[in-house]
Amino acid sequence: MTHAPADLTTFARRFGAIGTEPRLRILGLLVSAGVHGLVVGEIARELGIGGSTLSHHLEKLRQEGLVRVRREGTFLRYSVDAEALEELLAFLTTQLRATAGVEGARIAAEGLQ
């Protein structure tokens, strides 16, 4: 399965967004929180990340479509976008299968020589 260049750009941006330790920790926490998600203060307390730094990381994850945010009065509640994560997983799975297929064909061809 080949992906359109726009898809590849999206995947690259999303992988880049989770390519830092704080963002990966945030994403993991939000995954474990489930569909209900967490408000910013809960995320900050759980991970020990300060306000402006946390806001920066959450905004990057939101911009790349990995998390959703909704306002509840004066609070912002973040939750993971499961569909976006499933797309990333499907992309990786497709790439790994394609690589395994190519490698298997190479090994088989070498065995015939």
Image (spheres, grey):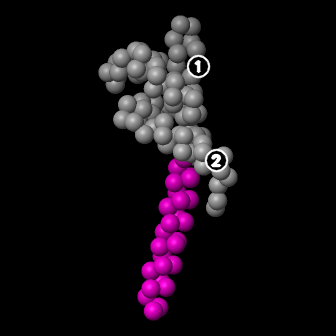
Element assignment for label 1: strand
Q: What residue span does the magenta drawing correspond to?
A: 88-113
| Residue 55: image location, x then y, percent | 46, 19
The residue under label 1 is 70
> Residue farthest to the bottom?
113
Q: CA distance from mark 1 to mark 2?
A: 26 Å
**Residue pictured at 44% horizontal, 80% vertical:** 107
* Amino acid type, callout 2: Asp
Q: In which quadrant is the C terminus drawn?
A: bottom left
The label on residue 92 is: none
> Residue farthest to the left?
48
Residue 110, quarter of picture: bottom left
Nearest to viewer (mark 1 / mark 2): 2
Q: Is residue 28 magenta?
A: no
The residue under label 2 is 7
Please identify the dominant SS of the magenta region: helix
| Residue 74: image location, x then y, percent | 53, 7
> Residue farthest to the top?
74
**Residue pictured at 51% horizontal, 28% vertical:** 60
**Residue pictured at 52% horizontal, 49% vertical:** 89
* Amino acid type, callout 1: Arg
